[in-house]
Image (cartoon, grey):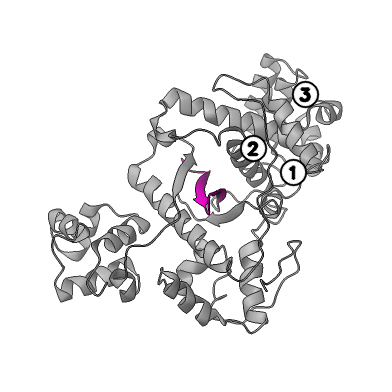
Amino acid sequence: MNNFNGERLKLARIYRNMTASELADKIGVSRQAVLQYEKNESKPKLETEFTIITTLHFPRDFFYMDNLNMVPVENTFFRALSTTKKIDLQTQEEKTKFIVYIYEFLNNYFNYPQLDLPEIDIDIDLNDKDNIEDIATNVRNYWGIGSQPIENMVNLLENKGIIVSTLNINNKKIDAFTQVHEINNKEKYCVVLSNDKQSVARRNFDAAHELGHIILHKNIEKLEELSSEEQRKLEEQANSFAASFLLPKNVFFNDLKDPLNLEYYKELKKKWKVSIAAMVMRARELGRINNSQYVELVKTMNYRKWRIREPLDNQWKLQETILFKKSIAMLKNSNILSGSQIVYEIGKYGIPMYAEDIEELLDLEKGTLSEENKLKNNNIILQFKS
């Protein structure tokens, strides 16, 4: 396509978290004009096109390519789906599509871990909580984890073939989310975690929560058609799964030797890498404390301002994604593609973008695609495709 592509304009606008009215104000035209551009009913004048390109900060080529052949999206699991602005949800959805699209580009070079999820025979309905404990145990057993603490949920998901990235979401209602794709007739999952929470324990729980959606809710076809109450129950189930998965019932029950002492939970946090708030709630679920005792513990945590930042939160290095970092480093260090060549090839693949945007999507250090960075040690094994 040699003409300005309005559908690409809409994609770029949503990516930059702008409504049609907001973009119109920034480029000095009416909202109706923007919508006409997006529907290819009219073309912007040259000076307007220049303003669009600089405002949305995409290379000019982006707007002159054919429609992007994105991998099909089956569902996106957002928290607070019904109370979040539509444009905020759309922005994160589009960014995640770009992440998966770049993943598919890199998959041409590497043998990435295949999706490795257990087949769960139990059919979960929205009111089911009793089976979640057993399902979490089955997943642990399938992956050979046993009852050991899981210090890094991010790397665990990556090693099991789930795409993971982190973004500066800047929206308190969207902590993390999962997008479900169908690629070559196989389901693929992309988990996006927020960089807004700089806490190892909370990141572990968020990642386990998203795994809960993947395991429990993969058969839901039209998530947006569920009522607010049904969506709330999905979130409760994912939370129950995360707690059961991170804090195995029998072992954690035995660890709760002093369940009314918040100082004791600090020691447990060192072992389990789970927030004190989540452990206190789990203690109530397992019957080690009653409801009134739980309420008193929560009041004390609020008084100590632990609901904002808990002890140990600033002492541990936040879990980082590895797969994209290692992929880029291997391409560069093996002299297959330089940083600028990676940016160029991704553009040829269909999404011309600036290096800083790709670095943000893939959770790379700033300058990775313009400077030579040394390969860091990590525990994901990648091999180039032959």
Q: Position of residue 140 (x, y in %)?
A: 77, 38
Of 195 and 313, which appears nearest the observer? 195
Please provide percent x and percent y for residue 263.
Answer: 78, 34
Q: Who comes first in sequence, dot 1 or dot 2?
A: 1
Residue in the image at 43% along x and 73% along y? 347
- Quadrant location of the C terminus in the rendered image: bottom right
* Residue wearing tag 1: 273
CA distance for labels 3 and 2 = 16 Å
Q: Based on the picture, tell me whether residue 182 belongs to the magenta stretch.
A: yes
Q: Which mark is residue 371?
A: none
- In this rendered view, identify the residue nearer to me: 150 or 296: 150
Q: Position of residue 277 (x, y in %)?
A: 66, 33
Q: Which residues are magenta?
A: 171-192
Label 1 sits on a secondary structure element that is loop
SS for tag 3? loop
> Of label 3 and label 2, which has the lower sequence position?
3
Q: Is residue 172 visible?
A: no
Using the rendered image of the protein, determine whether residue 148 is visible from the camera's viewpoint.
Answer: yes
The single residue placed furthest to the front in the displayed view is 185
Mark 3: amino acid: Leu
Residue type (three-letter) at the residue carrying disc 2: Trp
> Which of the 4 image quadrants contains residue 5?
bottom left
What is the quadrant of residue 165 in the picture?
Answer: bottom right
Closer to viewer: mark 1 or mark 2: 1
At x 46% / y 43%, what residue is drawn? 74
10 Å crowding of disc 2: few (<14), some (14-19), many (20+)? some
Per the image, the residue denoted by label 3 is 260
Quarter the N terminus occupies: bottom left
* Viewer-proximal residue among 302 and 42: 42
Q: Which residue is mark 2?
A: 306
